[in-house]
Every structure is written in C-alpha cells, then in structure tokens.
Amino acid sequence: MQSEILYTLYQMTKSKLSEPTTAQQNTPLTDQAMAYLRNAIQTQKINPGEEIDFTALAEKLGMSRTPIRESIRQLLTEGLLELLPGGTVCVTELSARETEGFYHVRDELEIVAARAAAVHISDLEIEMLKANLALFDKAKADPEKLSLIDNQFHTILYDACNNSYLSQTLRRLRIRIGLLQGRPFSNPERIIAAYKEHASIIRALESRVPEKAQRAVAKHYRSARKSRLSLLAQ
C-alpha cells in the first residue's frame, strides 16, 4: 500500500492532479482514443499485425467512429499503425532490420538519459523508483501488470533526466516497443533479471555518479534486448 501511495504523490507533483485544468477535464475524444491505442500497443493488448476493428473500438470507448478514424489517421503517420491493401488497418510489425535500428537509437538515448538522471534526480524520484521496485516484486505472477510497472519505472527515470525533449523522445520510442513480437515478462528468468537490473540502476543513481548509471542502464538494456530478440527468433 505504501508503494501505491508514494506513486500517487509523485504523479501529483508531476501532473498537478490535485488541481485538474479545464483542458484535462475535457480531453478531446480523438486524443482519448489515441491515448488508449498507444497504451494498448505499448502493453501489447493489441498485438503486432492485429487488425483494428473500428466498430468494436468505438463501442469499447463509448464514442462514435469519427474520433476513432481521426486517432487512427494520426497513428498511421506515427508509424504505429499501417494501412494494408483493401483498407484494413493493423498494428505495424517491425522487420528484423527495423528492430535493429530501433534498438540502436533507443539504447544510445537511454544511456544519455541515465547519465543526466544521475546528476539531476531528486530524492523523491529515488524513493519512487524504490517504491516501483517493491511493486514489481509483488507482481511477479502477473506479466501484464509487470509491463505497466516497468513502464512506470522508466517514466520516472526519463522525468529525472531534466530534459523534456529527450524525455518525450524516449517515451515515444518506448511505445514502439509494443511493435516487437513477444512478451518478455512471460519468462520467469527475465522477471528475476529485470528486478535485479532495476535495483542496480537505483543504486547507481543514488551514487550520483554518471558513469555508474551508464553502466547499470547499458547492462539492463543489453539483457532486455537479448531477451526480446530470443522471443523474435522463436
């Protein structure tokens, strides 16, 4: 329970949820649909290659097909969705070459963010990472929940780098992870390894030494990449 409370407090300091703005209360339906689809892709509730059912999605979200179409048009331009012959829209599947390019860019930027975070991270953010680690440990039997907790861990890390452009870029790249086949947290060995790697990253950040943070993050992403590519090979 303490971990959940800490995370809520952290979100309030970042998003000022205690004082919602009119814009937050009246988010356009198109933006709501895009947020839902991005999250569904990131967490693989919708799998690579899976067709988007406009009617079912509109019913699920309680809106007309118009905002659904607008959101899909935007996600087509972002490359998260693709239009097939005949008008079918599906979640993009990355080729082996595209996957290699994705990891090359993502991993380099993650290291830059880790070095910056080691310098700028606040005591609250350190505590939030520890709370997140505790939640991760409790959710070991729930792969879907682990994915959400893992995303939260990296979101806190991105916020700590004190560079909004870098943070936003990494958030978008992280959504694209959902375009890769396979669910790493379905593997118990990967769950144990990820927990240890996250703990190592926290210790490195606590040291406030950029080189230690870089090594810890680089090790984490080498391991994560190896696990994901092994799933692609199956």
Image: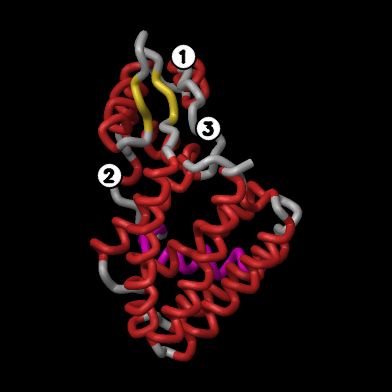
Report the Cα–Cα distance between label 2 and label 1: 27 Å
* Residue at 41%, 90% in the rendered image: 209
Secondary element at image label 1:
helix
**Number of residues whose C-alpha sits closer than 10 Å to that of mark 1, classed few (under 14), some (14–19) or many (20 or more):** few
In contact (CB < 8 Å): disc 3 and disc 2:
no
**In this image, 105 relative to 10: left or right?**
left
- Which region shows up in magenta? 1-17
Point out which mark residue 23 bears. 2
Give the residue furthest to the top: 86
Q: Nearer the viewer, residue 68 or 186?
A: 186
* Residue at 72%, 58% in the rendered image: 140
* Residue 193 shown in magenta: no
Q: Nearer the viewer, mark 2 or mark 1?
A: 1
Residue carrying label 3: 46
* Residue at 40%, 86% in the rendered image: 211
Q: Give residue 112's position: percent from left, percent from top.
A: 32, 72
Please state which amino acid type lies under the numbered disc 3. Answer: Ile
Q: Nearer the viewer, residue 176 or 222?
A: 222
**Number of residues whose C-alpha sits closer than 10 Å to that of mark 2, classed few (under 14), some (14–19) or many (20 or more):** few
Choose the circle earlier in sequence order: 2 or 1: 2
Residue carrying label 1: 55
Please state which amino acid type lies under the numbered disc 2. Answer: Ala
* Residue at 46%, 22% in the rendered image: 52
**In this image, 169 relative to 41: left or right?**
left
**Number of residues whose C-alpha sits closer than 10 Å to that of mark 3, classed few (under 14), some (14–19) or many (20 or more):** some
Q: Give residue 9's position: percent from left, percent from top.
A: 49, 68
Please state which amino acid type lies under the numbered disc 1. Answer: Thr
The number of callouts visible is 3
Choose the circle earlier in sequence order: 3 or 2: 2
* Residue 10 shown in magenta: yes
